[in-house]
Image (cartoon, grey):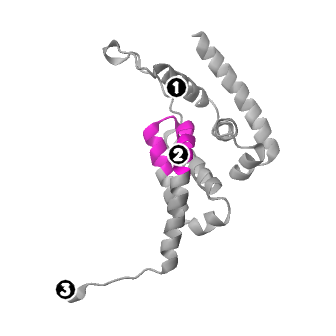
Amino acid sequence: MADDVLVVSLPARSSSRDAEFTAFMAEASGQLARTAWLLCGDTHRAEELVQQALMRTYVSWSTARERDPLAYTRKTLANLRIDTWRKHRREVLTAPDEVPDGRVDAGSEVHAERDRLVRALATLSARQRRIVVLRHLEGMSEREVAADLGVSLGTVKSTASRGLGQLRTALSSEGMQ
């Protein structure tokens, strides 16, 4: 039975490909996780989205590394989030009614602000949300966003403007409640 063992040797370039992807993944994971969280508003879903986007990027690494791997992965991430929107439609995150045991977390104000932002972002259309997140929360230029999403520069400008106006309205009306 010991003679039935099959030893497979992988080509040397595979290990350099893996090392290259591993370095990319280590460098980009934090930024991708932040983008994913801003797109979906849930830490666990964001982690899942990042893992799925990285898996798809790994499978297509030869294509991704020829261009900008981070842009390729961000676009994959945004497309994966759109797929989940299609499956689950609109989900609105709500804050818990009470803090257990009456305790207030030291970071509760920060969490409350993040929650307000995520709820306001949820009022935007999928396109507006992607553009606003990439442009204003990730700090990308209008040209970078246009290239990442495959839309015109004018579309990025007009969609960002409308999205920001809608965010201002949502955040100001929420602050009045």
The local crowd at label 3, few if under 14, some if 14 to 19, many if 20 or more residues have their Cα within 10 Å, is few
Magenta residues (range) = 28-50
- Circle nearer the viewer, 2 or 1: 2
Q: Tell me the distance, in whole angstroms, between the alpha carbons under discs 2 and 1.
A: 20 Å
Taking the image as shown, residue 153 lies to the left or right of residue 169, namely: right
Q: Tell me the distance, in whole angstroms, between the alpha carbons under discs 3 and 1.
A: 59 Å
Q: Is residue 45 magenta?
A: yes
- What residue appears at the point 59 percent right and 16 percent down from the top-left corner? 174
* The N terminus lies in quadrant: bottom left
Majority SS type along the magenta span: helix
Q: Is residue 124 magenta?
A: no
Identify the image quadrant of residue 162. top right
> Which residue in the structure is indicated by mark 1?
115
| Residue situated in front as seen by the camera: 55 or 81 | 55
Marking on residue 163:
none
* The C terminus lies in quadrant: top right
- What residue appears at the point 59 percent right and 50 percent down from the top-left corner? 79
- Name the residue at the left extreme: 1
Q: Amino acid at mark 2?
A: Gly
> Which residue in the structure is indicated by mark 2?
30
Rendering coords of residue 65 (x, y %): 62, 64
Closer to the chain start, of discs 2 and 1, is 2
Q: Please say if 75 is above or below 91.
A: below
Marking on residue 2:
3
- What residue appears at the point 65 percent right and 16 percent down from the top-left corner? 172
Mark 2 lies on a secondary structure that is helix
Q: Amino acid at mark 3?
A: Ala
Q: Please say if 154 is above or below 96.
A: below
- What residue appears at the point 19 percent right and 86 percent down from the top-left corner? 2
Rendering coords of residue 86 (x, y %): 54, 44
- Circle nearer the viewer, 3 or 1: 3
The local crowd at label 2, few if under 14, some if 14 to 19, many if 20 or more residues have their Cα within 10 Å, is few
